[in-house]
Amino acid sequence: FSTAVREGSMFKITKKESLAKNIKLFDVYAPNIAKKAKPGQFVIVRSDEKGERIPLTIADYDRVKGTITIIFQEIGRSTIDLGLFEEGQDLLDFVGPLGRPSELERFGKVVCIGGGVGIAPIYPITRALYKADNYITTILGAQNDKSLFWENKLREVSNEVFITTDDGSYGEKGRVTDILSNIITVSHVDKVVAIGPLAMMEAISDLTRPKNIDTIVSLNPIMLDGTGMCGACRVEVGNETKFACVDGPEFDGHLVDWQNAKQRALMFKKEEEIALNYACNCHGKGESNHV
Ligand code: FES
């Protein structure tokens, strides 16, 4: 973490926005982190002394205002606690930028895919790849029209955009892989970058492997505290043991041992259920998940 910054004392929330059901956006004043942040990296957030460390991929940064944008889904104790903070309040800890930045070159035709809350971290990557003169096809997947956000922002940095929803309430009914399958059947694609649930990233990697299309995924969903010490994010990639928070969070999707990654996620799920039950009994809150 040699390049990470742990700024002064407190970190003011300069903007709070509700993007969709249970999905919140914060702009947090952290000028030294904003100065260094690059697409693909993450920050570790701790709301107060009782709060757990939450690794969240950077959704955007403004070097002029000195802010970092984080987006999180309130589905557990830590993120529900975080969501209770209001504009003008301070967060106790905000450390970053952490993790290896995305590779942002001119690759040619790139398909950027964001699923669920993964739409947030795919945005700065898509913007940078668009600026690097790639032809960008963006595919966004959400449960329904109410859980989709940042469509317009993504449209501004894409040559074409496809939307899918599970229930067909907006865009095409189906999954992002349905659209990707059509695209790679009829046209040449140089690279795919996908961020979202593990099952989505696995399905995308399975689809692109036979065509040998370079596929990058983000394993942030299996990170727990993001410090490199808890061991929770250990994963096999190309028969080597890696830590998502130190060696990633981005990896070659074709080399990830998905069974191993999913087992890790399931392990947390059990712990999360215990934390949720415990928290429900105590405070009516539950453990978190994040991208
Ligand atoms: Fe704990 Fe990576 S999240 S070691």
Image (spheres, helix red, strand yellow):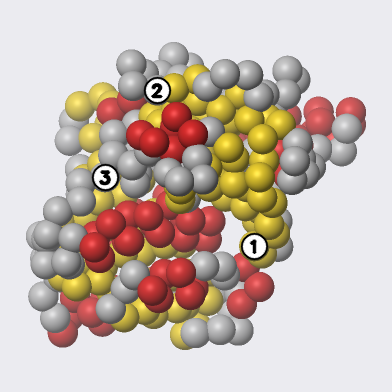
- Badge 2: how crowded within 10 Å, few (<14), some, or many (20+)? some
Q: Badges 3 and 2: C-beta atoms under 8 Å apart?
A: no
Question: From where the camera sits, is residue 114 visible?
Answer: yes
Q: Residue at x 40, y 23 (%)?
A: 4
| Real-space CA distance between mark 3 and mark 2, rounded to the nearest whole angstrom | 16 Å
Between the residue at mark 2 and the residue at mark 1, the CA separation in whole angstroms equals: 28 Å
Q: Nearer the viewer, residue 7 or 227?
A: 7
Q: Quadrant of residue 92?
A: top right
Task: Identify the residue position indicated by label 3 in the image.
Answer: 102
Q: Residue at x 59, y 40 (%)?
A: 28
The residues bearing labels 1 and 3 have C-alpha atoms spaced at a distance of 25 Å
State which mark lies toward you, 3 or 2.
2
Callout 1 amino acid: Leu
Q: Amino acid at mark 2?
A: Ala
**Image-based side of 23 in relation to 84, left or right:** left
For mark 1, what is the residue?
Answer: 19
Identify the mark nearer the N-term, 3 or 2: 2
Coordinates of residue 134 in the picture (x, y in percent): 17, 67
Instruction: Check contact, mark 1 vs mark 3: CB within 8 A.
Output: no
**Could you tell me which residue is drawn at 16 percent across and 84 percent down?**
186
